[in-house]
């Protein structure tokens, strides 16, 4: 199983290296809450939390499948399902941010629209990674390993592309309002376990 193991480890490393978006909350709180903004943040955070768990679980599944004893078929099945779950989760987060409407801050509407667009782009990227994994030849060990390398490269690019619009959305008052939400605090602590 020499061929796929190092590659799938690379895949797992790429995943934990930053492809996981979960709101990067500053954790700073302020006492002068804005009720409208707090309500918006609560709506988004409550919707994000289960999706963050789904992303973390998909991440863990790929990492578990990096053992030497995993066959190409097992790796393919696990990775494809994980990418599908991630795609669904990012799309759901995008829908939640869209449904919440614009936050009550300067340029709130533009920030919200940019974040939704970015989340949908990330969701589409994971969906295409799933297609790529589904198309790999599991009967030929060498071809499968090469195909996985390409997937790992794409995943790496995806993790490098970052989440600028999300970062912009979470700046300032919005980030503070989100940091006050229990569901965002617990969502932001999830990825720490995955960084291994």
Image (spheres, rainbow, N blue to C red):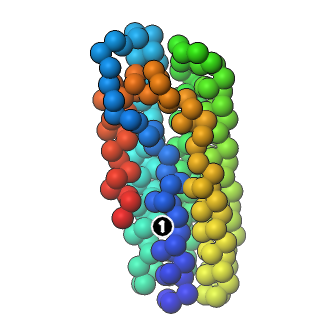
Query: Residue at the spot x=45%, y=10% of the render?
Result: 36
* Frontmost residue, 75 versus 116: 116
Task: Look at the picture and state if 1 lies above or below 109.
Answer: below
Q: Return the x and y of residue 38 as percentages of the image width and height.
A: 40, 17
Q: Return the x and y of residue 152 as percentages of the image width and height.
A: 60, 68
Task: Look at the picture and state if 33 lies above or below 138.
Answer: above
* Frontmost residue, 12 versus 135: 12
Q: Secondary structure at mark 1?
A: helix
* Left or right, 45 with reference to 91: left
Query: Residue at the spot x=43%, y=84% of the render?
Result: 68
Does the rendering let one see residue 39? no
What residue is disc 1 on?
13
* Frontmost residue, 45 versus 136: 45
* Left or right, 14 with reference to 146: left
- Tell me how many marks there are: 1
* Left or right, 169 with reference to 16: right
Q: Return the x and y of residue 55 as percentages of the image width and height.
A: 46, 50
Query: Residue at the spot x=34%, y=53% of the render?
Result: 192
Task: Look at the picture and state if 118 lies above or below 159.
Answer: above
Query: Residue at the spot x=67%, y=48% of the render?
Result: 124
Does the rendering let one see residue 141? yes
Q: Return the x and y of residue 70 as percentages of the image width and height.
A: 45, 80
Quadrant of the image containing the C terminus: bottom left
Rendering quarter of residue 133 = bottom right
Tell me if mark 1 has few (under 14), some (14-19) or many (20+) residues whose alpha carbon lies within 10 angstroms of its own.
many
* Left or right, 181 with reference to 162: left
């Amino acid at each position: 199983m020499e061929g796929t193991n190092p590659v799938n480890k690379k895949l797992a490393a790429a995943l934990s290296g930053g492809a996981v978006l979960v709101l990067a909350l500053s954790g700073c709180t302020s006492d002068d809450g804005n009720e409208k903004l707090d309500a918006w943040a609560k709506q988004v955070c409550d919707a994000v939390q289960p999706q963050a768990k789904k992303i973390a679980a998909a991440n863990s599944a790929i990492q578990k499948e990096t053992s030497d004893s995993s066959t190409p078929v097992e790796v393919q099945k696990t990775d494809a399902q994980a990418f599908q779950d991630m795609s669904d989760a990012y799309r759901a987060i995008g829908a939640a941010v869209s449904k919440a409407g614009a936050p009550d801050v300067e340029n709130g509407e533009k920030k919200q629209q940019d974040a939704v667009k970015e989340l949908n782009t990330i969701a589409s990227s994971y969906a295409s990674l799933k297609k790529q994994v589904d198309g790999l030849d599991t009967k030929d060990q060498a071809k499968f390993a090469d195909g996985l390398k390409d997937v790992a490269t794409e995943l790496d690019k995806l993790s490098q592309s970052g989440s600028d619009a999300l970062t912009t959305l979470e700046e300032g008052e919005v980030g503070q309002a989100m940091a006050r939400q229990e569901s965002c605090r617990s969502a932001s602590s999830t990825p720490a376990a995955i960084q291994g």
